[in-house]
Image: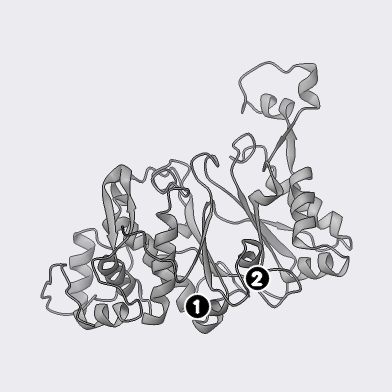
Amino acid sequence: MQRTLQQQSIEVEDALAVQELFYQNEWTDGLPVVPPTKDKIESMLETVPMDPQTIIGTIPERGSVFTLEVAAINAVMAGCLPEYFPVVVTALSAISDPAFGLHGPSASTHGPAILIIVNGPVAKSIGLNHGQNLFGPGVRSNSTIGRAIRLILMNAGGTREFDRSTLGHGGKYSYCIAENETTEWQPLHIQKGYSQETSTVTVFAGEAPNQFQNHTAQKAESILLTLADRMAALGTFNINGHSEMAVVLCPEHYQTCQSQGWDKKKIQEFLQKHAFRTRAELIRGGILEEEVQPQDEKTKLYAVESPDDILLVVGGGDAGRFSACIPGWGSLHYCRSVTKPLNQATCDT
């Protein structure tokens, strides 16, 4: 397939000079990059049979446009192998979906990152980690796919200019995982209506993982009450914010719940019901600026409005009873998770 590239070519003395050039021009995330040579870009493009100038996504509020060529350049820089590129393209398409509302979470002082959850056969074929050190370093596909999305946003999406994060978090370098699909539960993509054989990418604007531990509970209810308490921290944006929340249940917690007859749906319903604070608590904490009324002691404000607003996946190492919740950004009116199959990766019209 004949491909015409439009981005400017620059001749540089050596690989070290590339790093300095890119850093001085603010084309990196602060870490070294792979020089995006023409042959590497073309190898990346070979895995997605579309014209390089195909528009994969946009941020209308900024006039930002993401072409396939731009995505390929940044995927090379991030260290992606060509076989990762279809996942990068699908993730880019998903965050450009109007339902995701990319401008908001990528500019907010709240500082969320884009969590990418990959399901289906592609996760295994490209070696994505769903196990030990799930959110940590060491696996090339996890590290570079998430990094590619961040570089695209910084270099073509205006994020360097618009990002007003007060704190941010490490997921803004890379935040990509697979789900452990070897369990008895339905994986996320099947819950979303796709087949087992379909590979999907889910994107979610979230905080860093909020870990909790429960090493002693023998009952599923006890583990889930611990989780519900973590989900409903007084200062979490979800309380009174009406956003989604992701939950990553570790294998040991999963085994306890599954062996006692709990499935994902039952857990989502339990967590929605038990993850709350009273209105009085929010008033006393200064979250709501008003006087406590008698009815406020019994008025419940929930971490999520619906069980379906909980993205529940199994992941993490086999040892250790540590799980996590990931609070979402803003409101469902402005930002919600998006799931797309790998074969629907363009919004070009």
Question: Label 2, label 1: how many angstroms apart (C-alpha)?
Answer: 13 Å
| Residue type, mark 2 in image | Gly
Q: Is residue 10 visible?
A: yes
Q: How is the image coloured?
A: one colour
Query: Image point 25% across, 72% down: which residue?
Result: 51
Q: Quadrant for the C terminus, please.
A: bottom left
Residue 318 placement (x, y as % from top left) = 71, 76
Query: Image point 65% across, 73% down: which residue?
Result: 180
Query: Image point 62% across, 24% down: which residue?
Result: 288
Q: Is residue 173 visible?
A: no
Q: Which residue is mark 1?
A: 139
Circles 2 and 1 in contact, beta carbons < 8 Å: no
Looking at the picture, tell me which residue is in the foreground, 93 or 222: 93
- Secondary structure at numbered mark 1: loop
| Residue type, mark 1 in image | Val
Image quarter of residue 82: bottom left
Numbered marks: total: 2
Other-residue count near label 1 (Cα within 10 Å), few / some / many at <14 / 14–19 / ≥20: some
Left or right: 100, with 231 as reference point: left
Query: Image point 74% across, 44% down: which residue?
Result: 275
Image quarter of residue 297: top right
Q: Check the image and report above or below for 240 versus 267.
A: above
Q: Which mark is residue 14?
A: none
Q: Which mark is residue 316?
A: 2
Q: Quadrant for the N terminus, please.
A: bottom left
Other-residue count near label 2 (Cα within 10 Å), few / some / many at <14 / 14–19 / ≥20: many
The single residue placed furthest to the front in the displayed view is 349
Mark 1 or mark 2, which is nearer the start of the sequence?
Answer: 1
Left or right: 287, with 343 as reference point: right
Looking at the picture, tell me which residue is in the foreground, 121 or 14: 121
Residue 135 placement (x, y as % from top left) = 56, 66
- Secondary structure at numbered mark 2: loop
